[in-house]
Amino acid sequence: MSQRTSSSGPRPLLLAWLLALGGCFDDCGSNDPYDPQPGPGELGNGEFHYRCIDDGDPACIDGGSVGNFPARVALGGRFELAYTWNDDVSRAPPDLRSAASERLRLQGEIFTPLAEGYTAVLALLPDSSIGDLIHLRASTPIEAALQHHRVDYSTYSVAEGDELRFDAITRDGDAYVLAGLLEFTFAIDDTAVAEIVGTGHAHVILRARAEGTTVLHATLGDLTADLEISVGQGPVTSTDPTTDAETTTSTDSSTTDDSTAGTDATESTTESTDTGDTAGTTDTTGGVL
Amino acid sequence: MTRLVPALAALLAAATLAGCGPRYQTIVFELRSQPPIPVRLGADEIEIPVGIAVSVHARLESSSNIEFVPDDALDLDSEDRGILAADPTPGSHNFVFVGVAVGETCLTVEVEYEDEECIPVRVTAPG
């Protein structure tokens, strides 16, 4: 028998190592969107895993990247958590509990922040003692934005007949993109120019119908993000997510990266001081939160 | 021989009364985790913001010349778990304090199955 069919050769080991290192690079055969990197438990016994409920969560937009454990979650933003022990990944996972249910609600397996600030999540052992814990920070969204491939836009040019997905995200007062699944509503002013052909919790799919200009609105409570859509006969706007560079291959179209709102900050959940990364509008690692 | 037994018993009783073992004096909390917001963990008062959990090792101090050992029974019980939860975590004399809701309560220190004191606790609103 050749080594290629051996199950104990180095290839399975390498694959297992890669999966352990970076999380699931594919969806592992399920419909779950990609999830960010786990956060270490503060007692050092294991890791907390942030699970996006849907790819409308900015921690998992497009399912296209594996980012850091979210530094901040939105008030009202829904998510799930899981936990694995360091000493034995096959050990039964503990029950998770909110430290303060009036601040962080746990319903079924879904967490929802109800109050600003830090709240701990506790990993319980079978005898009800506490095996580990992690603090999550919740913030109030103060602005909304519409993104395509994780870049904010206030105007966007699209070719007639094209379909394009835009994701709605929120930021807090410190410009952190907030994790957690929120429920946006979407509307478009002139459906003769572009129409909504699909929506999710926090994304919309537009189809450009005819030349002209219209505005797409994403609304979350009192917050609204507006995006001017210009439909031309042949414009194609593309964005290089690794460089923030945009190339417009049509002369009659223009696309504006909303750089003022495109500042993503990063923070360690265990650090007492925040550090802001104001260098770019795109988080190339996926750790936008 | 018959006189020796009562004498030994008397000696043992006298030794017990004199404190031939550790005698609770106070408790010292040593942080085992770094909460994102400062907490105050003293023998005279505990102050912890709501939502915050902190892991501590409780060290018992003895007023006699015999120290407490990890095998000595120690239990910390919150008088109101709706305000502060105090739960054990793996390791001798290790606990996690959790600020559950804003309010005041106290933490009973039980050493070798005897209540020694109740430390005032304040769970504060986040700053």
Image (spheres, rainbow, N blue to C red):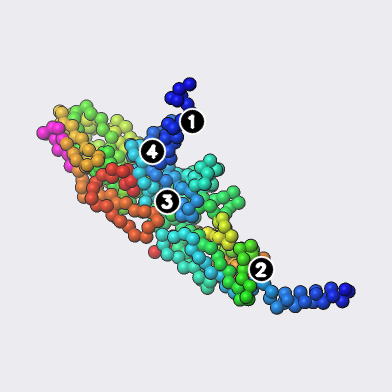
- Residue for badge 2: B114
Q: Is residue B23 above or below residue B78?
A: below
Other residues around mark 2 within 10 Å, as few (<14) / some (14–19) / many (≥20) = few
Q: Secondary structure at mark 1?
A: loop
Q: Secondary structure at mark 4?
A: loop
Residue B41: image location, x then y, percent: 49, 68
Q: Magenta residues: mostly which secondary structure?
A: loop
Q: Is A34 situated left or right of A250 in this image? A: right
Residue A213 appears anywhere in the view = no
Q: Is B116 situated left or right of A219 in this image? A: right
Q: Residue at x 40, y 37 (%)?
A: A18
**Is A254 colored magenta in this rendering?**
yes
**Is B120 colored magenta in this rendering?**
no
Measure the C-alpha gap from mark 2 to mark 4.
52 Å
Of all chains, the one bearing label 4 is A
Disc 3 or 1, which lies upstream in sequence? 1
Amino acid at the residue labelled 2: Glu
Q: Are marks 4 and 1 in contact (CB under 8 Å)?
A: no
Q: Residue at x 42, y 51 (%)?
A: A113
- Residue for badge 3: A113
